[in-house]
Image (cartoon, grey):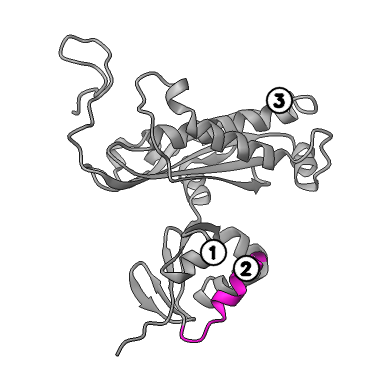
Amino acid sequence: MSQFTHIDHKGQAHMVDVSAKAITSRTAIASASVTMKAETLEMILAGGHTKGDVLATARIAGIQAAKRTPDLIPLCHPLMLSKVSVEFEPDASLPGIRIAATCKLAGQTGVEMEALTAASVAALTLYDMCKAVDKTMLIGDIRVLEKRGGKSGDWRYGDDRSEQPSEAGSIHTAGTSVKETSHLATRTLQVRFFAELREQLKQDEIAVSLNDLESEGYPLTIDGLSQWLRQHQAELASILDRSGLMVAVNHKMADKQAVISAGDEVAFFPPVTGG
């Protein structure tokens, strides 16, 4: 069994020295959920709350919280985060909102705490925004769903059944199991842009929810993803319509009909020329 890393040989709390660790790309995804009355969920989605856009406010709060994690959690290292995203998925079966927070950096220690903090504060902000109309809200399902990078390698919730709770790893919250929560919260993929595409967009990576594609009738293929991107980000249209544009799924070249799944990395490249 592994030892607690923040306790020294004398049993005293200390900050772990990571100076000898290699700098690697590290990513963590954490989840949370807020269960509420059906009418509260409808009010949020309709934008009818008197305090304003509930989800936009909660997203900003989660991103800000990730960056302030070392101020909130003792012994956490101050980190130069390269990406923080907070995504929301309405779920009528709760009813309520599911939250997935993703944090990323190139560094010497992981970003699990930053992702957990982002998801937690986003959930707390949802509660704060809506408590005047619904005092019965329940915050739950706060957990790390996935981490990538570092010496210990990649890990995803559910991969190691010995680490899951009893009853085949299913803790039920408002009628939904942890396995179902993990599946729903991680139904995203990463879209990356390289070379002059990245320079043109002023960004190299965006997260896309497969639930959004499906709900709007787009097929889960490269072509469907491209159509959805054109519809939702006008600046991408000129890039995706370029002659000779190349695309790869999980580092393998693919065509427009290639199927995409949750967790995939889709990369777009400009045409390659040579002499």
User: Of helix, strand and loop, which one carries label 2?
Assistant: helix
The one of 226 and 88 positioned closer to us in this rendering: 226
Question: Residue 147, percent across and down?
Answer: 35, 44
- Badge 2 crowding class, 10 Å Cα cut-off, few under 14, some 14 to 19, many 20 or more, is few
Structural distance between the alpha carbons of marks 3 and 1: 43 Å
Q: Earlier in the sequence, mark 2 or mark 3?
A: 3
- Residue 238 forms part of the magenta stretch: yes
Quickly name the residue at label 1: 201
**Going by the picture, which residue comes out furthest to the bottom?**
275
Question: Residue 110, percent across and down?
Answer: 33, 38
Quickly name the residue at label 3: 136
The residue type indicated by label 3 comes to Thr
Q: Looking at the image, is mark 3 or mark 1 nearer the viewer?
A: 1
Q: Are marks 2 and 3 in contact (CB under 8 Å)?
A: no
For the point 50% across and 55% down, which residue is it? 187
Asked if residue 44 lies left or right of residue 197, the reply is right
Q: Which residues are drawn in magenta?
A: 232-244
- Residue 260 forms part of the magenta stretch: no
Q: Earlier in the sequence, mark 1 or mark 2?
A: 1
Please state, as top left, top right, bottom left or bottom right, where the C terminus lies in the image: bottom left
The residue type indicated by label 1 comes to Leu
Question: Residue 34, percent across and down?
Answer: 62, 34
Question: Residue 214, percent across and down?
Answer: 61, 65
Q: Looking at the image, is mark 2 or mark 3 nearer the viewer?
A: 2
For the point 48% across and 81% down, which residue is it? 257
User: Of helix, strand and loop, which one carries label 1?
Assistant: helix
